[in-house]
Image (tube, grey):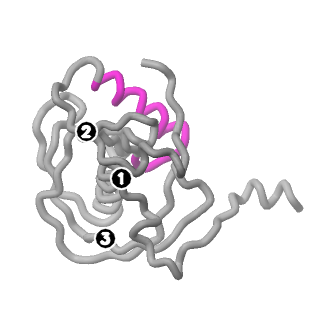
């Protein structure tokens, strides 16, 4: 697979509904491996395939036991509520508060092609919802409270300008 990088806000793939993965094969495994690389290099908590220009229903995430993937994920159940600040690798420099479920149950195929059902809460539940939104062409800024969206300057840039 070619080396991919994160696509930025304005690219049409970020606003499209991604296609279901019809067959879990070596191409999907290769895509997942490439997504792990990109997520790690960019210090992300999660990454959806559209964020590297691939309109497939795949996302990866990093949990306490390392990176994992979900293929063709579906939200089965959501409960509770949490509001927290989110950002996005495809929209660098912006963040805002987004309301999400506190707990979610999702189904899909894992990185080995096995069907899984995962219950997540807190930050991991937020990551799942954020990445699943990407698969539907929705960005965090579409859901964020507009009054909370702000520009964030990385600390390194501030130090360089002093």
Residue receiving disc 3: 100
Closer to us: mark 2 or mark 3?
Answer: 2
The answer for how far apart the CA atoms under marks 2 and 3 are is 24 Å
Sequence-first disc among 2 and 3: 2
Residue situated in front as seen by the camera: 7 or 70: 7
Which residue is drawn at the image coordinates 89% and 62% (left, top)? 162
Where is residue 117? Give x, y as percent.
12, 48
Q: Residue furthest right?
A: 162
Residue receiving disc 1: 137
Mark 2, secondary structure of its residue: loop
127 over 18 or under it: above or below: below
For the record, the magenta segment spans 28-46
The quarter of the picture where the N terminus appears is top left
73 over 53 or under it: above or below: below
Residue receiving disc 2: 19
Mark 3, secondary structure of its residue: strand
Q: Give the number of callouts.
A: 3
Which residue is drawn at the image coordinates 69% and 62% (left, top)? 153
Closer to us: mark 3 or mark 1?
Answer: 1
């Amino acid at each position: 697979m070619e080396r991919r990088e994160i696509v930025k806000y304005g690219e049409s793939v970020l606003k499209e509904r991604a296609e279901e993965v019809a067959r879990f094969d070596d191409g999907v495994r290769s895509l997942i491996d490439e997504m792990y690389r990109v997520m790690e290099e960019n210090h992300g908590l999660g990454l959806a395939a559209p964020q590297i220009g691939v309109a497939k229903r795949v996302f990866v995430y990093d949990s306490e036991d390392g990176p994992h993937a979900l293929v063709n994920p579906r939200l089965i159940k959501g409960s509770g509520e949490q509001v927290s600040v989110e950002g996005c690798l495809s929209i660098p420099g912006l963040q805002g508060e987004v309301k999400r479920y506190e707990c979610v149950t999702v189904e899909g195929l894992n990185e080995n092609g096995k069907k899984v059902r995962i219950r997540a809460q807190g930050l991991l539940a937020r990551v799942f919802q954020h990445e699943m939104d990407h698969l539907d062409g929705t960005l965090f800024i579409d859901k964020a409270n507009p009054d909370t969206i702000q520009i964030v300057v990385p600390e390194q840039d501030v130090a360089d300008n002093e």
